[in-house]
C-alpha cells in the first residue's frame, strides 16, 4: 500500500504568498536546462505559507520558495520547500521530484492577520506576519506547471481555483539559512489566497 495518495492530489488550501524581484546572480540553483524568466533584468521569486485543510486529501503545513522560469506556459521551479508531513514529503519527492524537507511550521490565524514561523532542529528558517487589506475577493481559475529535475526536466501540471486578496507582509529570513538570499529585501506584492482548490499532478 502506498504511503501517499496517487496523483493527482486534490487539495484545499489557505495560502499567503509574496513575490520578490531578485537579481539572477543571487538565485538558488535551478534544474539543468531551466532558465529564470527575467523582467527588467530581475527574476521573480514566490514565497508561500500554505495550510492544507479538509476536505482536501491531505492536511499539513508548508513553506516554499519557487522561481519563475522560461517555458511554453506559466511555469516555476520549487527551489526550497518544507512540510510537517511525512506523507507529503514522500509523495512530493517520489511523484514529482519536489525537494521537500521536514520542518516545524507554526501558523496563527486571526480575523485579518496571520503569523508563521518555520524552523528545523538546527536553526530557524523564516518568519512572517500578514495583514489582509480591504478588497472584494474574486474567484480566478488558473493553471501552471511545476518543473523539477529528474532525467531531464519533469513537468507537473497544476490546476487551481483561487480567490486572491491583497495583503501586507513583513518577512524575516535567517541570513545564514537556505532563504538567506531574500534577507533584507522587501516583497513587491503580497496576497492571501483563502479556500483555494488545487489539482496537483497528471
Image (tube, grey):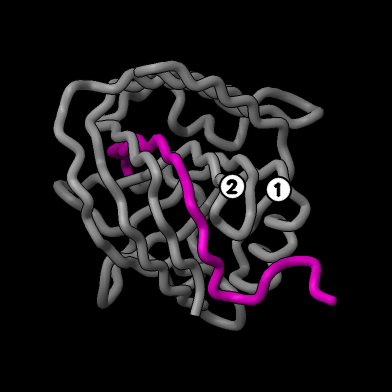
Label 2 packing within 10 angstroms: few (<14), some (14-19), many (20+) = many
The answer to whether one can see residue 126 in this image is: yes
Q: Nearer the viewer, residue 92 or 120?
A: 92
Q: Which residues are magenta?
A: 1-23
- Left or right, residue 70 beside residue 91: left
Lower sequence index among marks 2 and 1: 2
Decide whether residue 18 is among the magenta residues.
Answer: yes
Estimate the spatial distance between the alpha carbons at disc 2 and disc 1, rounded to whole Å: 6 Å
Secondary structure beneath disc 2? strand
Q: Position of residue 123 (x, y in %)?
A: 73, 24
Q: Residue at x 27, y 45 (%)?
A: 163
Q: Nearer the viewer, residue 152 or 7?
A: 7
Give the residue at mark 1: 101
The quarter of the picture where residue 35 lies is bottom left
Q: Are marks 2 and 1 in contact (CB under 8 Å)?
A: yes
Q: Residue at x 63, y 48 (%)?
A: 59
The quarter of the picture where residue 116 lies is top right
Give the residue at mark 2: 81
Amino acid at each position: 500500500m502506498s504511503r501517499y495518495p496517487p496523483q493527482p492530489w486534490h487539495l484545499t488550501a489557505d495560502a499567503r504568498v509574496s513575490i520578490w524581484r531578485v537579481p539572477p546572480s543571487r538565485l538558488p540553483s535551478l534544474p539543468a536546462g531551466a532558465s529564470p524568466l527575467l523582467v527588467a533584468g530581475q527574476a521573480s521569486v514566490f514565497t508561500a505559507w500554505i495550510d492544507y485543510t479538509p476536505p482536501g486529501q491531505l492536511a499539513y503545513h508548508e513553506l516554499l520558495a519557487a522561481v519563475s522560469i522560461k517555458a511554453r506556459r506559466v511555469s516555476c521551479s520549487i527551489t526550497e520547500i518544507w512540510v510537517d508531513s511525512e506523507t507529503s514529503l514522500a509523495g512530493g519527492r517520489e511523484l514529482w521530484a519536489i525537494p521537500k524537507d521536514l520542518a516545524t511550521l507554526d501558523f496563527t490565524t486571526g480575523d485579518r492577520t496571520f503569523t508563521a514561523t518555520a524552523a528545523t532542529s538546527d536553526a530557524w528558517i523564516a518568519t512572517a506576519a500578514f495583514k489582509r487589506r480591504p478588497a472584494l475577493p474574486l474567484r480566478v481559475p488558473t493553471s501552471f506547471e511545476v518543473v523539477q529535475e529528474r532525467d531531464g526536466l519533469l513537468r507537473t501540471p497544476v490546476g487551481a481555483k483561487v480567490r486572491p486578496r491583497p495583503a501586507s507582509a513583513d518577512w524575516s529570513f535567517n541570513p545564514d539559512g537556505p532563504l538567506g538570499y531574500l534577507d533584507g529585501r522587501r516583497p513587491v506584492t503580497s496576497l492571501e489566497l483563502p479556500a483555494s482548490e488545487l489539482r496537483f499532478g497528471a
